[in-house]
Image (cartoon, rainbow, N blue to C red):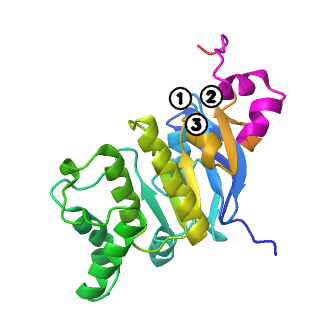
Amino acid sequence: MIHAPVIQVNDLTARYGETIILKDINFVVNRGDVFIILGGSGCGKSTLLKHLIGLYQPAKGTIQIHGKDLVSASGPDRKKLIQSFGVMYQTGALFGSMTLIENVILPLDEFTCIPETGIQKIARMKLNLVGLTGYEQFYPSEISGGMQKRAAIARAMALDPDIMFLDEPSAGLDPITAAGLDQLILQLSNDLNMTFVIVTHELASIETISDRVIMLDKRVKGIVAEGHPLELKQHSKIPWVRDFFNRHIDETIS
C-alpha cells in the first residue's frame, strides 16, 4: 500500500532580509523514514529545520504536514499541526531546575487533561523507551551529555508525535555514545513507525541510520543531491558530493 508523504515541501524559498538562503527547494518525507538533511557549514540546514517546525515563515512556498499547510495554518489548526511533531534541539534544551521526569511531564501538563497519575505513568514510560529508567529524579547537570540527549528525545515524544525533528543529535558526543544514540533512533523508528527528520553532518551516523538524505549547498542555495548516502558516496555524478561523503577536501569551497 502506498502512503502519502507525511511532509511535502514545495518551492520553498527562505531568506534573511534580502539575503536568500534557500531557493525553490522541493522534497518529500515518507512515513517511517529516517530522513537526513546534510551539507557543509552555512548551507541552510538549520534554517530549513526552523521552517519545517514553524519557527520561521518562508518567503515563498508551502510546507505540508499530513496534507495540511503549516505556512497558512493559524489558530487551533496550527496548534494541532505543531503538536503532531516533537523537536529535540542541539543542546537538548532541558530545564536545569527540573528533574528528568519533570521535564517530560511539562508538555503533558501544558497540553493535556490527563490526571496526574496518568501523566506520571506516561512520563516514566517515555524515559524507559530511551533507556533512562532509574534516572527520573536526576537533574540534567547530574547526567552525561548522551543521557541529556536521550531525555530530550523522551520529552519530545511526550505527546505521542508521529514525526520527530532532531537537530544535530550526535553533536558533542563521543563515538560510542553517538553510536548508542543512533541505535535508539533506529529502534524508535522500527518499533513505533516514527518518522525522523534529522539535521546532522556526522557521516558515521548518516550511513548507519538514514533511509534517504538531501544535501544542501550554499553555492546553489538549494538541494544538490538526494538519495541513499552510500549510493551518493559511490555514484553521485557531482564530484564534490562524492568528496563530502568520502571526506575529501574540496578546494573550490571558500
Label 3 sits on what residue type?
A: Ala
- Reading the image, the residue beneath label 1 is 42
211 vs 57, left or right, is: right
Tell me where the magenta segment starts and ends, as one range. 229-252
Q: Nearer the viewer, residue 170 or 113?
A: 170
Closer to viewer: mark 1 or mark 3: 3
What amino acid type should be assigned to the residue bearing mark 2?
Answer: Lys
- Res 126 quadrant in image: bottom left
**Residue 170 seen by the camera:** no
Is any atom of residue 144 visible in this view?
Answer: yes
- Which of the marked residues, 2 or 3, is nearer the chain's N terminus? 3
Please determine whether, in this image, residue 184 is positioned above or below residue 31.
above
Mark 2 and mark 3: Cα distance apart in space: 23 Å
**Does the magenta portion include 240?**
yes
Please identify the quarter of the rendering in which residue 236 is found. top right
- The percent coordinates of residue 182 (x first, y second) are 52, 49
